[in-house]
Image (cartoon, rainbow, N blue to C red):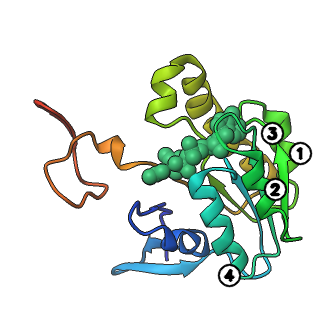
Amino acid sequence: MRYEGRVVLCAYSLSDAPCCLLSEWGRGQHDMQRRTVIDIAGGRFLVTGGASLIGSHLTQQLLEAGAAAVILFDNYALGSPAVAASLAQDRRVTAVRGDITRLPELLDALDQVDGVFALAGFLTLPLSQNPGLGLDVNVLGMYNVVEACRYRGVKKVVFASSVATYGNPEVDAVDERTPFYLTGCKFF
Ligand SMILES: NC(=O)c1ccc[n+]([C@@H]2O[C@H](COP(=O)([O-])OP(=O)(O)OC[C@H]3O[C@@H](n4cnc5c(N)ncnc54)[C@H](O)[C@@H]3O)[C@@H](O)[C@H]2O)c1
């Protein structure tokens, strides 16, 4: 049986996020099948951008699901240290000040981590205010995350993309086959 890894983090169903780590869809011999990749209970996870809006909620869910450790990796460029400190009241949570554009900091933090949620990034507004830094974080930073995970043998990385990558789609629900739609033109 051959599996192809896919990562889908549904924007309107944050509660599905831990499931993305837990299992993945793969093409079996005859149909798409789900297989378990990582057990959240007892697992060790790192959340880049852990002090973010999504990261803080995700951390709560991982804790509720029995994670043994959650590392919040954030440089607080946009997130709040107070959010990380509040989450760190749970002894399973560690707040690490780190920058995804610095590979050595990621390598240090990723020791013995089972899975990573890659949430650090510059969304539309901060990106428009500081495009140079935003590109560094979103492109070079994400490359560093994947490279550090490969080096450290992390079993799975979940990348939270955005519906904004589809432009202004003509349909209500989008999936991987939906074309990018910029008003007036389509890219397939
Ligand atoms: N908010 C939404 O509605 C939404 C919807 C779909 C997808 N997402 C995705 O979820 C993720 C998180 O979104 P959010 O709204 O919670 O973001 P956010 O703006 O609240 O947080 C981004 C986090 O990244 C951190 N960060 C920025 N640069 C960093 C760096 N160099 N190193 C380490 N940390 C850094 C910031 O300090 C902040 O805590 C993003 O990838 C986003 O695309 C968000």
Q: Which mark is residue 85?
A: 2
Q: Earlier in the sequence, mark 3 or mark 2?
A: 2
Point out the tag, 2 or 1, that comes first from the N-terminus: 2
Q: Are marks 1 and 4 in contact (CB under 8 Å)?
A: no
Category of crowding for the residue at label 1, using alpha-carbon neighbours closer than 10 angstroms: few (below 14), some (14–19), many (at least 20): few
What mark, if any, has residue 176 been given in the picture?
none
State which tag comes first along the sequence, 1 or 4. Answer: 4
**CB-based contact (under 8 Å), mark 1 and mark 3:** yes
Q: What residue did someone put label 4 on? A: 65
In percent of the image, x 78 and y 61: which residue is there?
86
Q: Residue furthest left?
A: 184
**Distance in Å between CA atoms under marks 1 and 4:** 26 Å
Give how far across and how far down residue 143 sits, in percent: 63, 36
- Residue at mark 4 to residue at mark 2: CA–CA distance: 20 Å
Tell which circle, 3 or 4, labels the residue nearer the N-terminal end.
4
**Is tag 1's residue or tag 3's residue first in the polypeptide sequence?**
3
Label 2 neighbour load within 10 Å: few <14, some 14-19, many 20+:
some
Q: Amino acid at mark 1?
A: Asp
Determine whether, in the image, residue 180 is placed left or right of residue 45.
left
Instruction: State the separation of the CA atoms marked 1 and 3.
Output: 10 Å
Looking at the picture, tell me which residue is in the foreground, 134 or 44.
134
Q: Nearer the viewer, residue 2 or 113?
A: 113
**Residue drawn at (35%, 49%), measured in percent from left and top?**
163
Q: Is the CB of the residue bearing disc 1 within 8 angstroms of ligand 1?
A: no
The numbered dot on residue 108 is 1
Query: Can you tell me whether the CB of the residue at mark 3 lies under 8 Å from the nearest atom of ligand 1?
Result: yes
CA–CA distance between discs 3 and 4?
A: 26 Å
